[in-house]
Image: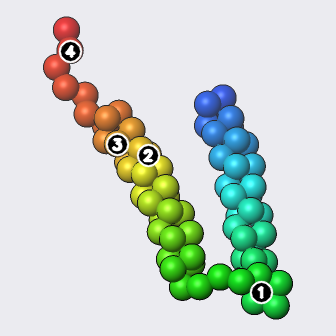
C-alpha cells in the first residue's frame, strides 16, 4: 500500500524542520562555553523555560488536532 501524498509531504517537511531545530539547538549548546560567553543560572533558566514553553504549546496543538479528528460527532 502506498503512502498518501499528505503523509509523504508531512514526512518530508517535518523531517527537515526537526533537523533544523536540532541543528539550531546544537548551535545554542555552543554558547555554553564559559571561555567565550558570560551567563548565569537565571539566563539558563530563562532560555530553557522559553524553549520548554514553546515545546508544550506545539505538542498541545498536535494533541488537540489528533483529538479533534478522532471525534466523529453527529452528522446528517
Q: Would you say the residues marked 1 and 2 are in contact, meaning their CB atoms lie under 8 Å apart?
A: no
Between marks 1 and 4, how big is the CA–CA gap? Answer: 59 Å
Q: Position of residue 2 (x, y in %)?
A: 66, 35
Identify the residue under disc 4: 75
Between marks 1 and 2, how big is the CA–CA gap? Answer: 35 Å
Asked if 40 appears above or below 76 in the picture, the reply is below
Q: Would you say the residues marked 3 and 2 are in contact, meaning their CB atoms lie under 8 Å apart?
A: yes
Q: Which of marks 4 and 2 is in front?
A: 2
Asked if 28 appears above or below 50 in the picture, the reply is below
Query: Foreground residue, 53 or 72?
Result: 53
Between marks 3 and 2, how big is the CA–CA gap? Answer: 5 Å
Residue 29 occupies quadrant: bottom right
Query: Within 10 angstroms of label 3, few (less than 14), some, or many (20 or more) residues?
Result: few
Q: Is residue 66 visible?
A: no
Query: Foreground residue, 59 or 26?
Result: 26
Q: Residue 33 carries which label?
A: 1
Quick check: 48 left or right of 64?
Answer: right
Identify the residue under disc 2: 62
Amino acid at each position: 500500500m502506498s503512502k498518501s501524498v499528505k503523509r509523504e509531504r508531512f514526512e518530508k517537511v517535518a523531517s527537515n524542520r526537526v533537523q533544523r531545530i536540532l541543528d539550531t539547538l546544537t548551535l545554542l549548546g555552543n554558547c555554553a562555553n564559559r571561555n567565550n560567553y558570560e551567563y548565569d543560572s537565571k539566563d539558563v533558566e530563562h532560555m530553557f523555560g522559553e524553549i520548554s514553553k514553546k515545546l508544550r504549546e506545539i505538542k498541545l496543538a498536535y494533541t488537540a488536532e489528533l483529538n479533534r479528528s478522532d471525534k466523529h460527532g453527529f452528522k446528517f
